[in-house]
Amino acid sequence: MYKATGQYKKALDYTDSLNILKDSLTNAEKAKAINQMEIKYKTAEKDKQIVQNQLLIAQQKSKIISKNTWIGSIAGSIVLLCIILVSVYLNSRHKQRLQNEQIKTLQQDNTISILKGVVQGEEKERGRIARELHDGIGGMLSAAMMRLMAIRHEKAEITTVPAYIEAMDLLQEMGDEIRKTAHNLMPEVLLKQSLPDAIRTYCNFVEKSKTLHVDFQSYGSFDEITQKSKLNIYRIVQEMLKNITEHANASHALLQLFANDRLLTITVEDDGSGFDTEAIKKGIGLHNLKTRVDSMQGHFTIESGAGKGTSVYIEFDMQKMIADDTI
């Protein structure tokens, strides 16, 4: 308008204002474009950094996983090795324990065999002595008595001689003692009577001394046990009653014999003077008793004290008494 109307100065001023405005708009657009490009560049850099960081984290994770895998493998190997070593050690200990138990069992069996041999040897010797007494000395005494009786028939007046009468009485008494001794050494009563009856007969024999009263009690059946076991039990009772009569100064004794399907027990109690069990452990009577009980794989306990009497308890496995004929 100003140019058309000839107002050129104003037209130039507005033209300059227009150019300044255009430059301003152009610069603003350029700045905006540059700013957008800078934002895109920074965003791209950040994305690149994030990707690099993610890759680095992934690599670190992979290294950690690999390291943990190695550590786990090594730890597992160590644990497995420890388990193997412990298993080997325990297996070795178990084998050693089994070997020790086998050695102990063999030693016990050997000891029991030796004790059985000792007991059997004693019984054989008892039998030999009994036969010598009965057949040898007993026969000689019988012959002597028959000879003296023959003299009496030849000379009847000799029966009034005190020395002859004393000699006959002495020979008769000696014969009785020899028969009793032979009977104790080899009790034939066991072949004719049950074990309780044989022990009762022996108790009656002990009571004839009038120094000890024996109260014998028997419970259960003893028919199934072997003859050798019966003989051993009879010997044990003999040994205990012998110890009471010789050492205990007792006036009364209780003897109990008990048997069931599992156990055979012997209990002996007396009202004697008692003794110190530790001080008399090495006594011959107690040693013989222990040897015979051990040979039968039994167990026994002794309780005693000065002035308190003595109590003996012996226990055997009934099945062994029935099955083992080598005792």
Image: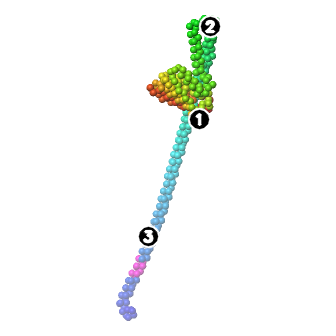
Outermost residue on the bottom side: it is 5
Dot 3 alpha-carbon crowd within 10 angstroms: few under 14, some 14 to 19, many 20 or more: few
- For residue 130, what is the image quadrant? top right
Amino acid at the residue labelled 2: Arg
Q: Upstream in the sequence, badge 3 or badge 2?
A: 3
Q: Position of residue 51 (x, y in %)?
A: 48, 65
Which residue type does callout 1 highlight? Asp
Say what secondary structure mark 2 lies in: helix
Q: Residue at x 63, y 25 (%)?
A: 192
Residue 246 appears at what percent x and percent y?
50, 21
What's the magenta bit mostly, secondary-structure-wise?
Answer: helix
Q: Residue at x 60, y 5 (%)?
A: 157
Q: Give the residue drawn at x 50%, y 50%.
A: 75
Secondary structure category for the residue under label 1: loop
Residue plotted at (58% across, 19% down): 180
Q: Quadrant of the N terminus?
A: bottom left
Magenta segment range? 23-31
